[in-house]
Image: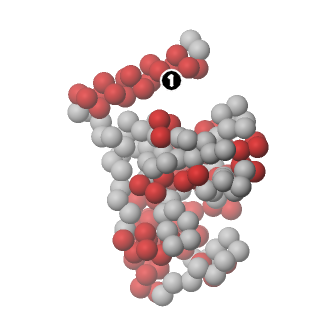
């Protein structure tokens, strides 16, 4: 069976399961997220989305979020320090909603979503040409919203992908 036929059949099955009410919309998402889509904690949205999208907590395991929240003074080259109460609140929410399923079972190098095995598999050369990452309209692999039109809402469905010129 060709890859495109497999994708089409997978989408049809997800739609049938969704219509039957046996899975949530988030579970039917093309990226295989497990469980219902979690709404971001308002404090997390306020603090983190001020600089980049508020990445869904399920994209990294708890260990990665714990390390990241413990090193905010050097958050990927930036001082993203927060007051202790905010760190506690956000850390607790991230830990409770971190990825626990197979694709995020291991912390990626440098706790970067873009270096995780599942991200690299979804964005491999055959799927995303290398020159896309170099476009001014994209900038880098961490700019999810450049191609995923609903990334800010936590949805990374393949049907919502628009590769900018």
Question: From the image, which quarter does the N terminus lie in?
Answer: top right
**Which residue is farthest top?**
1
Residue 163, horizontal then vertical, whole percent: 61, 42
Q: Secondary structure at mark 1?
A: helix
Q: Is residue 15 left or right of residue 87?
A: left
Q: Nearer the viewer, residue 31 or 141?
A: 141
- Residue 111 shows in the view: yes
Q: Mark 1 Cα within 10 Å, few/some/many (few <14, many 20+)?
A: few
Residue name at image x 56 percent, y 20 percent: 4
The residue identified by callout 1 is 7
Residue placed at 38% from the left, 36% from the top?
Answer: 28
* Residue ID at (40%, 59%): 97
Give the position of the C terminus as an image quadrant. top right
- Give the mark count: 1
- Between 112 and 124, the residue placed more toward the observer is 124
Instruction: Please state the horizontal and vertical placement of residue 123, each as a whole percent of the image.
Output: 64, 40
x%, y% of residue 145?
A: 54, 53
Task: Evaluate whether residue 98 shows in this view.
Answer: no
Would you place residue 19 above or below residue 96 in this image? above
Give coordinates of residue 144: x percent, y percent. 57, 53
């Amino acid at each position: 069976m060709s890859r495109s036929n497999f994708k089409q059949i997978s989408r049809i099955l997800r739609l049938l399961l969704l219509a039957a009410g046996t899975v949530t919309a988030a579970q039917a998402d093309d990226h295989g997220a497990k469980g219902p889509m979690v709404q971001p904690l308002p404090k997390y949205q306020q603090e983190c989305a001020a600089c980049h999208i508020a990445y869904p907590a399920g994209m990294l395991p708890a260990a990665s979020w714990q390390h990241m929240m413990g090193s905010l003074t050097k958050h990927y080259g930036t001082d993203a320090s927060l007051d202790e109460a905010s760190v506690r609140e956000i850390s607790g929410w991230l830990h409770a909603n971190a990825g626990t399923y197979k694709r995020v079972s291991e912390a990626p190098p440098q706790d970067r979503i873009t270096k995780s095995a599942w991200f690299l598999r979804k964005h491999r050369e055959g799927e995303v040409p290398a020159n896309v990452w170099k476009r001014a309209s994209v900038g880098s692999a961490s700019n999810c919203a450049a191609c995923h039109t609903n990334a800010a809402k936590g949805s990374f469905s393949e049907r919502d992908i628009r590769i900018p010129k």
